[in-house]
Amino acid sequence: MRAVPAASNTLSLVWEGLLDLLYPPHCLLCKLRLEEGSLCAACIKEMQFLAPYRACDRCGDGVEANSTQCEECQTGGFPAFEWSFGVGHYSGRLSQAIRLLKYGERVALTEPLGRQMALAIVPPYIQRIPLNLHGELEFDDVVPVPLHASRYRQRGFNQSERLALVIARERGWRLDTMGLRRVRATRAQASLDKSERGTNVLGAFEARTADYFAGRSVLLVDDVLTTMATVKECASVLKGAGASVVCVAGLARGG
Ligand SMILES: [Zn+2]
Ligand SMILES: [Zn+2]
């Protein structure tokens, strides 16, 4: 499977379909034979979804043992989003699955992983937000963190976009992949220290038009919330383009 470059999504999906016919599906992590799908129940169970993680109430950044908010939020430096949460912890089988998805081009993994995210986006995670969502959990738009066009061409797909697509479909929300664009290629956040991370993504994103998200409540979707700098920057662009509420959902925290 790896021998085929992801020249286009359609091509790799067709290829995966053909392989399913030739070789019945197996769990991508433990190789267990499956009737359908790409992950077995045992692997999903081991993924530490909803694992406890000491995160800031407000922004989702890491916090000290006894506090509920990070230092930055305690001093009023709130991010532009209302709330962020990671569905799982970036370790064990979940990190294995994410690496396979990103670097092994196993696009099929976005189905089971996206469904886990869609299931997890429920109170109490969201209910602490000052909601402007008609009294119930509902987003106008699901927006993935975009890749730069050059990275997109190189990888053949955007894993955050695929996760957002599954979430939007499962929850009946609208997917928007056009409104937020990455206009500048950036260096990998993991290679930078905390202060560099903020400046690295500064001005990297743009809304399609100045009021594209006017009055909209937006669920911003990322794969791994390694540093919050990227989603903070995206959220302020979304707010700048008029979004009324921005919540951030990451498949995993840490990494
Ligand atoms: Zn398995
Ligand atoms: Zn915080």
Image (tube, rainbow, N blue to C red):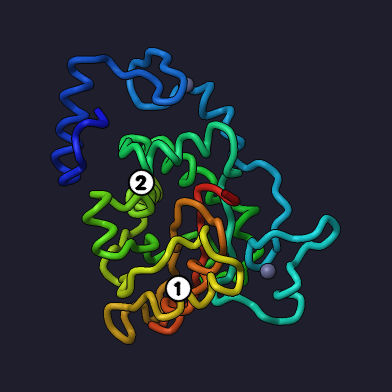
Label 2, label 1: how far apart the Cα atoms are: 26 Å
Q: Classify residue 156 as left or right of residue 96.
A: left
**Residue 188, quarter of picture:** bottom left
Residue in view at x 54 percent, y 31 percent: 93
Identify the secondary structure beneath mark 2. helix
Query: What residue is shown at x 38% (from left), y 40% (from top)?
Result: 101
Q: Position of residue 178 (x, y in %)?
A: 26, 68
| SS assignment at label 1 | helix
- Judging by the rendered image, the residue that carries numbered circle 1 is 201
Residue 180 shows up from this direction: no
From this viewpoint, which residue is outermost toward the bottom? 210
Type of amino acid under label 2: Val
> Label 1: how many residues lie within 10 Å, few (<14), some (14-19) or many (20+)?
many
- Nearest the eye: 235 or 215: 235
Query: Are discs 2 and 1 less than 8 Å apart at CB?
Result: no
- Disc ID at residue 99: none
* Percent x, y of residue 132: 53, 73
Residue 33: x and y in percent read 38, 13
Q: Residue at x 31, y 39 (%)?
A: 105
Residue mark closest to the camera, 2 vs 1: 1
Is 105 placed above or below 82 here?
A: above
Which of the two discs, 2 and 1, labels the residue nearer the N terminus?
Answer: 2
Report which quarter residue 115 is drawn in.
Answer: top left
Residue 255 seen anywhere in this rendered image of the structure: yes
How crowded pointer 2 is (Cα within 10 Å; few <14, some 14-19, many 20+) is rated as many
User: As shown in the figure, which amino acid type bears the numbered disc 1?
Assistant: Val
Total residue callouts:
2
Is 105 left or right of 167, judged from the image as shown? left
Q: Which residue is mark 2?
A: 166
